[in-house]
Image: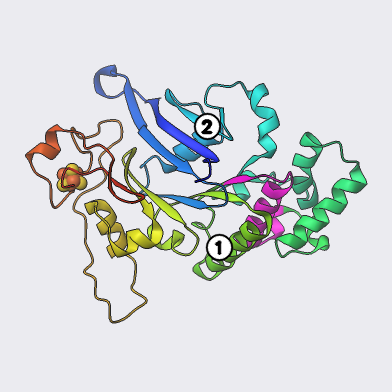
Amino acid sequence: MSEALVSVKNISKTFSANKGMFGKKKFVHAVNDVSFDIMPGETFSLVGESGCGKSTTGKLIDHLITPDTGEIWFEGKDISKISDNEMRPLRSDIQMVFQDPYGSLNPRMKVQDLIGEPLLIHTNMTAGERLKKVHELLGVVGLSPSHGERYPHEFSGGQRQRVGIARALAVGPEFIICDEPISALDVSIQAQVINMLEDLQEQMGLTYLFVAHDLSMVRHISDRVGVMYLGNMVEIADYDKLYEKRYHPYTEALLSAIPQVDQNVKTERIHLEGEVPSPSDPPSGCRFHTRCPKACDRCRREVPELKKVAEGHFVACHLY
Ligand code: SF4
């Protein structure tokens, strides 16, 4: 078995929030003791509702923030505690594509300068060489060289995301963190962007961490999926295995919300009661117990550990 490209080991991250009533300082437990590996060439998806810690996990791996505890290994090097200077040479290997390309692209810069900026920072290319490379990248993401002369506001949402992807590809990364890259796009455009990401992965041997809020979005692109709830990893499995047999009641509810392609397969939609509890005041024991239809006394007291239930399939639930 090959070595993991990315290895996340027991990372936790807490943010201090506004003071609550009586001036007591609050802490948001965004990511809590999360571990997983990403193998070279695979797409590992992190899925869960808003506030589950999936995007924070992506930012921790991208070194935009640092974990309080735990380690993040990339290509055999622990990058969790290194300085920004030490991280700089790795910047061309790890890139990020954001949910809101409009927010992440400087509106005053032409698209050719936006895509060329990482080349200016990380390479010794001349201006002519950079422009040639930018034109090549525009072609790779299905745009033409003339698009380089335009500004971000002159593009549709889908085209802007293509620009964001071209910018991420500029320095030839091995690993791309795609943070909800299709959530803000029309459904008709989502499939085009997913297909393009899949083609690029095949052509360039890329490895992806794909962050999304529901399982239907990662259906076609994922090799493996990690399901997160309120900062905890609750289930990890191959997407196909998860589709056949899921163990965690939360994963069951997420999957029941996906419309069935096969009309002969009848699944009952599971509606979870109540809101997701605040990560600043997470429930005791299993954090899902306040919404779990199968919760028992033990669930309120004891935190379930992520345990192996089948080959490559891990679940954190007292039922297994
Ligand atoms: Fe539900 Fe208990 Fe399992 Fe948590 S540990 S998912 S509350 S059954």
Which of the labelled discs sits on residue 172, or is there none? none
* Residue 39 within the magenta-colored segment of the rendering: no
Image: 142 above or below 24: below
For the question of whether residue 94 can be seen, the reply is yes
Q: Quarter for ligand 1?
A: top left
Which residue is most to the bottom? Answer: 264
Name the residue tied to disc 2.
Answer: 73
Residue at the spot x=57%, y=51% of the render?
A: 41
Q: Is residue 185 above or below residue 7?
A: below
Residue 90, how many percent across, how many down?
A: 66, 33
Q: Which residue is drawn at 21% across and 60% down?
A: 271
Residue at the front extreme? 1
Query: Is residue 173 shown in magenta?
Result: yes
Helix, strand or loop at mark 1:
helix
Residue 194 shown left or right of residue 247 in the figure: right
User: Does residue 226 appear to the left or right of 134 in the view shown?
Assistant: left
Magenta segment, principal secondary structure?
A: helix
The residue nearer to you, when weighing 278 against 82, is: 82
Distance in Å between CA atoms under marks 1 and 2: 27 Å
**Disc 1 packing (10 Å; few <14; some 14–19; many ≥20):** some
> Foreground mark, 1 or 2?
2
Residue range (magenta): 152-176
Occupied quadrant, residue 317 = top left
Count residues near mark 2 (Cα–Cα under 10 Å), then give few for <14, some for 14-19, many for 20+: some
Q: In which quarter of the view is residue 19 placed?
A: top left
Residue 290 visible, this orientation: no
The residue that appears at 28% across and 37% down in the rendered structure is: 278
* Front in this rendered view, residue 144 or 207: 207
Give the residue pinned by disc 1. 194
* Residue type at the position of mark 1: Ile
